[in-house]
């Protein structure tokens, strides 16, 4: 029986037939609730709006975090006293999370760490503007103050300035805010690595083999524009195949190790040139950690005490939210079908069924376009 269940999960059918439609219906519900909250914001009730939006964001993203448990994946956190220095603060401080961009699950790992710290709803991120095209999610991300960029400094500078003013309002309202920044700007591929190495050589910088050269502009604007309590520096290292959302939905487990440490914002330089050197130094440290991980299976540097690691467990609320989403979808679907049949609305039933199927396809196409299509990382100035 157990092996049959595993084969069924591995086929992806449960995710396709049950998880995807129920998740899409949950996304529609959350987007509708988020839209209903906008009058609160317009009326100046910012704290109430922020707290309610935080709850909606958490509900919407917990089924994604649950995929780690569904697939049997392992997420191991390393560092110096991570429970006290990281997990007790990361979901509660005004913070930035700096992350290297290894693969397609880095953002989901960040959500899981925030959820483990009790602050999934405080997640913000610098994202490419195209992500707003993802049905329902794009609206929610916009409404909860994700920073949507065109990757053109001339147009992005004003966007960033306005976003930082929003963070000040979060701080004044005593609502946590955690901005995830990927200074590399894109996921690691062999082609991009070669371009990054050429760039490093042209600038007389050390050549990195496991990370891309970080770009400074976004972080420079953030450390100067935000009012921060903490900066968290995270190094992501996959053990074996990194995986993605589709492999998790097919119950293919992955194992990811993350070294994370807290940095005092006051210790981070604010002058752009000095910050650029500081940031590159951080990436050189990530390079050493990844070399150690590949050679010895440890993220500790030479002379550091090796951490046994803290296995992150998916919180029970993730499974509960996923189950609740499935029940909610079934109740709404069965109720609508029953009403249509009792009232002879067969055309409406057929039209709605086709429309929902097209919406599922559109969601898949949008996610593929913005998530699995790699962006450019040419030989540009930092």
Image (tube, grey):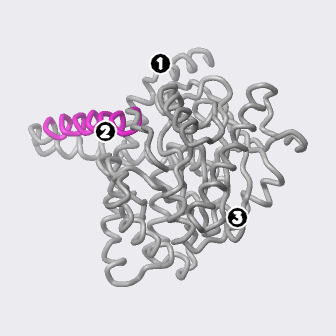
- Tell whether 323 sits left or right of 206: left
Q: On the rendered structure, is 139 left or right of 113?
A: left
Q: Quadrant of residue 161?
A: bottom left
**Frontmost residue, 60 versus 206:** 206
Residue 200 is labelled as none
Q: Which residue is mark 1?
A: 11
- Label 3 CA crowd tier, 10 Å (few <14, some 14–19, many 20+): many
Q: Main secondary structure of the magenta part?
A: helix
Q: CA distance from mark 3 to mark 2?
A: 34 Å
Q: What segment carries the magenta color?
A: 350-372
> In the image, residue 294 lies at what x, y percent?
74, 26
Q: Residue at x 56, y 20 (%)?
A: 5
**Is the residue 137 above or below the residue 51 in the image?**
above
Q: Secondary structure at mark 2?
A: helix
Return the residue nearer the eye: 171 or 272: 272
Q: Which residue is mark 3?
A: 89
As helix, strand or loop, the secondary structure at mark 1 comes to helix
For residue 116, say whether it is visible: yes
Task: State the image coordinates of residue 289 (x, y, percent, origin top left).
Answer: 75, 38
The residue positioned 56% from the left and 63% from the top of the image is: 272
**Residue linked to disc 2:** 366
Q: CA distance from mark 2 to mark 1?
A: 23 Å
């Amino acid at each position: 029986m157990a092996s049959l269940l595993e084969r069924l999960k591995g086929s992806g059918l449960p995710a396709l037939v049950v998880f995807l439609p129920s998740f899409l219906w949950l996304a529609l519900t959350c987007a509708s609730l988020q839209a209903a909250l906008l009058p609160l914001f317009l009326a100046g009730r910012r704290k109430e709006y922020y707290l309610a939006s935080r709850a909606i964001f958490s509900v919407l993203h917990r089924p994604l975090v649950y995929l780690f448990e569904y697939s049997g994946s392992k997420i191991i956190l390393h560092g110096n006293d991570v429970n006290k220095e990281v997990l007790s603060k990361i979901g509660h401080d005004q913070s930035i999370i700096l992350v290297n961009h290894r693969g397609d699950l880095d953002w989901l790992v960040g959500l899981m760490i925030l959820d483990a710290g009790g602050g999934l709803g405080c997640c913000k991120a610098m994202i490419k503007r195209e992500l707003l095209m993802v049905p329902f999610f794009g609206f929610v991300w916009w409404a909860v103050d994700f920073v949507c960029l065109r990757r053109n400094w001339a147009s992005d500078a004003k966007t960033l300035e306005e976003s930082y003013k929003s963070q000040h309002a979060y701080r004044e309202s005593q609502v946590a805010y955690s901005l995830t920044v990927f200074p590399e700007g894109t996921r690691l591929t062999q082609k991009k690595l070669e371009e990054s190495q050429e760039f490093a050589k042209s600038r007389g910088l050390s050549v990195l083999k496991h990370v891309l050269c970080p770009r400074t502009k976004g972080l420079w604007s953030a450390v100067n524009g935000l009012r921060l309590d903490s900066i968290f520096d995270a190094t992501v290292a996959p053990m074996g195949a990194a995986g993605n959302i589709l492999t998790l939905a097919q119950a293919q487990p992955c194992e990811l190790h993350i070294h994370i440490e807290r940095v005092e914002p006051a210790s981070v330089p604010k002058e752009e040139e000095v910050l650029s050197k500081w940031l590159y130094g951080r990436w050189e440290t990530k390079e050493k950690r990844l070399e150690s991980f590949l050679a010895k299976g440890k993220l500790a540097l030479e002379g550091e005490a090796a951490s046994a690691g803290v296995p992150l467990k998916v919180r029970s609320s993730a499974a509960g939210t996923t189950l609740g989403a499935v029940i909610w979808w079934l109740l709404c679907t069965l109720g609508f079908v029953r009403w249509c049949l009792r009232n002879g609305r067969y055309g409406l039933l057929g039209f709605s069924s086709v429309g929902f199927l097209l919406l599922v396809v559109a969601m898949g196409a949008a996610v593929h376009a913005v998530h699995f299509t790699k962006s450019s990382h040419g030989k540009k100035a930092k």
